[in-house]
Amino acid sequence: MALHFLVESVPDGDRVELTGAEAHHAAVVRRVRPGEEVTVGDGRGVWLTGLVEEAASGRVAIRIDARVDVAAPSPRLVLVQALAKGDRDELAVQAATELGVDEIVPWQAARSISRWSAEKAAKGVARWGTIVREAAKQAHRAWVPTVSAPVTTAQLAARAGARLLVLEPTASLPLSALTLEHEDTRDLVLVVGPEGGIAPEEIAALTDAGGEAVRLGATVLRTSTAGPAALALLNARLGRW
């Protein structure tokens, strides 16, 4: 499979250039060479196929042979990932990107051991954004997921126009049995708690706002694996896999 790279914007002509860090990654790390076929995207649906004409650490020139405009997925899959200690939340972000998530929302849950202050939040969002970009490239995704600003439980409960699916091991409804109507294009928002689980008052707030408590199975998954597992299941249910 051809190597895939990202650019900020796609030119109108039949040439595209990789510069800066992306050119260095292509020429030095991945060692692309003239004559090699690669793909290039803007992360917003444009998908280009072309041949490398020049390859240097600061500039890689590609002749475009084909262009496809990939439609955005509908419904969108959103992961609300509670902040977790260590790198567990980052592992969830990386895997979720590979598995087709369209948006990732950091959640400062009541039981989150990790806490993001205002300054730390900006760095955290930027860090998650870098993880998403690299994972999307590796997965050859035409659409790169967005990483939104952190939310509180109240802000999450107030999210309009979405179907909230709260992952809770004690819920009676399995996610696999959830009714999905083809005509329903609302975002499917998966809410994943931190290491200690979602607090009872948070579950109450989210279900009172219209959220649905669902479980994945008889076992309890870690915060790093619950979201990706749910995304895999939804991909199959939606016919994307």
Image (cartoon, grey):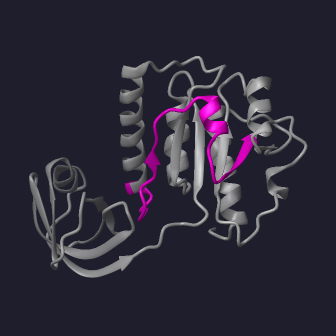
Residue 105 vs residue 159, the one in the foreground: 159
Residue 155 vs residue 104, the one in the foreground: 155
Q: Residue at x 67, y 24 (%)?
A: 195
Give the tally of numbered discs: 0
Which image quarter: residue 74?
A: bottom right
Q: Residue furthest right?
A: 172
Query: Is residue 206 one of those drawn in magenta?
Result: no
Which image quarter: residue 184?
A: bottom right
Q: Is residue 30 left or right of residue 198?
A: left
Which image quarter: residue 51?
A: bottom left
Query: Where 190 falls versus 18 (above or below)?
Result: above
Query: Where 197 falls versus 238 (above or below)?
Result: above
Where is residue 152 drawn, in percent x and y? Answer: 58, 29
Q: Is residue 171 left or right of residue 126?
A: right
Where is residue 75 drawn, in percent x and y? Answer: 61, 63
Which quarter of the rendering shows the N terminus?
bottom left
Where is residue 226 drawn, in percent x and y? Answer: 68, 40
Query: Is residue 147 one of those drawn in magenta?
Result: yes
Q: Residue at x 42, y 37 (%)?
A: 128
Which quarter of the rendering shows the C terminus?
bottom right
Where is residue 207 drawn, in percent x and y? Answer: 79, 39
- The stretch in magenta equals 137-166
Residue 167 vs residue 74, the one in the foreground: 74
Q: Residue at x 64, y 65 (%)?
A: 185
